[in-house]
Every structure is written in C-alpha cells, then in structure tokens.
Amino acid sequence: MPLPGARKAAAGAGLLRYFSGQPCVNGHLSERFTCSGSCVDCNAEKRRADLPKHRAACKKSYQKRRPAVLEWQKQYRENNPEAIKMRKQRWRRENPDTDRTYNLNRRAMLASVGGKVTGAEIRAIIDRQAGRCAACGAKAKLEMDHILPLALGGRTEASNFQGLCKPCNIRKRSQHPIDFNRSRGLLL
C-alpha cells in the first residue's frame, strides 16, 4: 500500500529520496528519487548498463579536446609555479607515508630490482621500532633504509627495510649490513 503524499512530504522536507511502500514497474521495493519519482534500483541498473557506452563517449570527447587541455595545462604550469610548488608541499605534509613510498618504489623501479612497499608497511616498521633508530637507538625522525641496499641487489620489500636516523643513514650509504656494523665496532 503506497504511503499517501510521501513524495510531496519528502520534497517539502528537502530530502532527495523517499520510500513509497510500493514496488516500481520492474518490481523493486526500494527508495525513489524525490525529483522524478523514479526507482533508485532501476536508475542504478540503467547506469551500469550504460557505463561502457559512457566511458567510450568520455574517451572520444577527451581525444577531441586533448590538444587544448594540454596547452591549458602547459600555460597553467608556466604562469603558476609558486601555486604548484605550494600545493605539492602541502600534499607532502599531509601524506608523508604515501610520498615516502612513492620515492622508495620509484628508486626500486629505476634500479630494476623489483618489489613494492606500501604506506601501511612503512608505518608498521616505524611503530615496531617505536620511533628509534635501528643502528644507534636514538629517538628521531626515521628515514627508511634498505637493509641490503639496492646497489647490492636488495629488493623494495617490507622485510628489507629498517628505520635509521639521518646521521646513521648517511653513514651507512650503500654498505652491506655486515660491513656497516663492522665499521661501528659491533662485529669482528
């Protein structure tokens, strides 16, 4: 049994959807849109069916506009270098783990050693070390270090990372972990 005046009441209350209590012509017993009275499920099915056609139309439209879009982007970059710089800096501040993983994964790709690391894995390493350097034990902002360096064939995987403070990371460079620990007097 339909709810009398449900659409009008929903529109009066400023709602986008309402429930009529009656199935649509396709048998869906779901909410309806206040503006058109059409079924939400029917609308979703139609969008899913039209998606490949919609994507093809968007791609075709972009191909037509591509030269103009590229020119606009070029002009924007030339005219707004400070705004772009500030936006990048703000993003890096707001997404430190993602920025860090981007750089680590890029270095691995350029070195052709393979592997990928995620921001969650980096955060887990830092948490596991309780914010302390793996070499000297100092509480500091940690830099991610490949235990077995990329130059020696180390992969970019969570198991090959440790957090080092900046001085220790600079001192280690691309040394093998055994050589690094020997230089610190920890191994004979």
Image (tube, grey):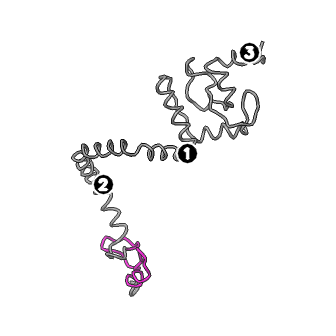
Magenta residue span = 7-32
Mark 3 or 2, nearer chain start:
2
Which residue is label 2 attached to?
51
Label 2 SS: helix
The N terminus: image quadrant = bottom left
The C terminus: image quadrant = top right
Which residue type does callout 3 highlight? Arg
User: Nearer the viewer's eye, disc 3 or disc 2?
Assistant: 3
Which residue type does callout 1 highlight? Asn
Which residue is label 3 attached to?
182
Give the side of residue 66 with respect to residue 33, left or right: left
Above or below, comparing residue 67 to residue 110 in the picture: below
User: Nearer the viewer's eye, disc 1 or disc 2?
Assistant: 1
Q: Nearer the viewer, residue 96 or 149?
A: 96
Label 3 SS: helix
Which residue is label 1 attached to?
95
User: Does 19 appear in magenta?
Assistant: yes
- Proximity of marks 1 and 2: CB atoms separated by less than 8 Å: no
